[in-house]
């Protein structure tokens, strides 16, 4: 996906287009773009939050997981608990 296509999807997603948001989430996950996932998650997109947690866990990004857990995300807290018991 080109930068222009990503920009268009981002604009559509910000205007409430759920399909564009889903495509943006998929692209961000494929490219390890945690910043985009986090931005969408902070806007209330549950799918982005789930994907952010999965991607952060895969990349060993404990800071992101801890931040999400501190913000009340139960799934992030569970992932941190699982990692600490390994």
Image: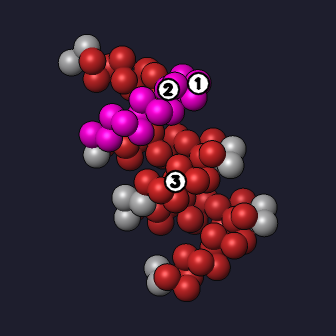
Residue 86 falls left or right of residue 23: left
Distance of label 3 from label 2 (alpha carbons): 16 Å
Question: Which residue is located at x 42 percent, y 60 percent?
Answer: 33
* Dominant secondary structure of the residues highlighted in magenta in the image: helix
Contact (Cβ within 8 Å) of mark 3 with mark 2: no
Q: Residues within 10 Å of mark 1 (few under 14, many from 20)?
A: few
Outermost residue toward the right?
15
Contact (Cβ within 8 Å) of mark 1 with mark 2: yes
Q: Is residue 56 visible?
A: yes
| Residue 66 forms part of the magenta stretch | yes
In the picture of the structure, the residue carrying the numbered disc 3 is: 37
**Toward which corner of the image does residue 82 lie, by quadrant?**
top left
Q: Residues within 10 Å of mark 3 (few under 14, many from 20)?
A: many
Please report whichever mark, 1 or 3, sits nearer to the chain's N-terminal start.
3
Residue 77 x, y percent position in the rendering: 45, 22
In the picture of the structure, the residue carrying the numbered disc 1 is: 72
| Residue 53 forms part of the magenta stretch | no
User: In the image shown, does 32 or 19 lie closer to the viewer?
Assistant: 32
Residue 37 x, y percent position in the rendering: 52, 53
For residue 69, the mark is 2
User: Circle 3 — which element?
Assistant: helix
Residue 51 x, y percent position in the rendering: 48, 46
User: Circle 2 — which element?
Assistant: helix
For the record, the magenta segment spans 60-75
């Amino acid at each position: 996906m080109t930068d222009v296509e990503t920009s268009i999807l981002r604009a559509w997603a910000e205007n409430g287009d759920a399909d564009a948001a889903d495509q943006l989430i998929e692209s961000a996950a494929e490219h390890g773009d945690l910043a985009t996932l986090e931005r969408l998650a902070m806007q209330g997109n549950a799918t982005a939050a789930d994907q952010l947690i999965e991607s952060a866990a895969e990349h060993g990004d404990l800071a992101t997981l801890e931040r999400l857990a501190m913000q009340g995300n139960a799934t992030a807290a569970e992932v941190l608990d699982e990692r600490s018991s390994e």
